Image (spheres, helix red, strand yellow):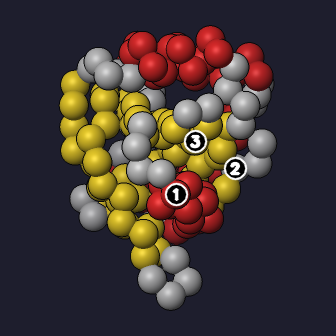
């Protein structure tokens, strides 16, 4: 599955949300590099978004869409998706002539997120590495000297 720009990904998520706004779940954590992982699920679909904070008001983000979740992954999301620390999240995703505002409540769960990542890795061996690489590459392109001081 290809890593996609966040604006394209959220346009597709918004279209699905507009058709049916019930039953959406958001799970999040922070990876070892300090990037935020956000998992958004609805029924048998799952999206992963990885974001690197540039400043308090801006992030660089990339994501991908996983299709046809098998029952084991879906059950894990259902079972564990309601637990964890509840945090508010919001994102402003620029589009061609407007923007998508995504707001809601996410469950912050390091252990469950790592479990989900390992399950996804069985199906998409390099997806976590590719997603992290794309976010870091975009960050370095936009802010070449910034990472030297972190």
Q: CA distance from mark 3 to mark 1?
A: 17 Å
Q: Residue at x 51, y 36 (%)?
A: 41
| Sequence order check, earlier mark of 1 and 2 | 2
Label 3 CA crowd tier, 10 Å (few <14, some 14–19, many 20+): some
The x and y percentages for residue 46 are: 58, 36
Tag nearer the camera, 3 or 1: 1
State the CA–CA distance, disc 2 to disc 3. 11 Å
- Please provide percent x and percent y for residue 45: 61, 37
Q: Nearer the viewer, residue 116 or 70?
A: 70
Residue labelled with disc 2: 3
Q: Residue at x 67, y 26 (%)?
A: 69
| Residue 95, horizontal then vertical, whole percent | 52, 77
The answer to whether marks 3 and 1 mark residues whose Cβ atoms lie closer than 8 Å is: no
Disc 3: which residue: 47
Mark 1 and mark 2: Cα distance apart in space:
24 Å
Mark found first going from the N terminus, 3 or 1:
1
Residue at point 28%, 48% (across, down): 104
On the question of residue 94 being in view, the answer is yes
Q: Which mark is residue 9?
A: none
The residue lying at 47 percent from left, 61 percent from top is 18
Residue 132 visible, this angle? no
Q: Which residue is mark 1?
A: 19
């Amino acid at each position: 599955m290809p890593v996609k720009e966040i604006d394209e990904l959220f346009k597709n998520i918004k279209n699905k949300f507009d058709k049916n706004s019930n039953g959406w779940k958001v799970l999040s954590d922070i990876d070892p590099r300090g990037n935020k992982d956000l998992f958004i699920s609805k029924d048998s679909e799952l999206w992963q978004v990885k974001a690197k904070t540039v400043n308090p008001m801006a992030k660089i983000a990339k994501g991908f869409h996983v299709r046809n979740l098998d029952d084991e992954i879906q059950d894990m999301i259902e079972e564990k998706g309601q637990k964890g620390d509840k945090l508010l999240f919001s994102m402003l995703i620029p589009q061609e002539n407007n923007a998508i505002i995504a707001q809601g409540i996410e469950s912050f769960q390091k252990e469950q997120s790592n479990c989900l990542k390992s399950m996804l890795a069985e199906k998409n061996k390099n997806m976590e590495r590719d997603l992290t690489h794309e976010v870091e590459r975009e960050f370095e392109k936009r802010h070449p000297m910034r990472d030297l001081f972190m």
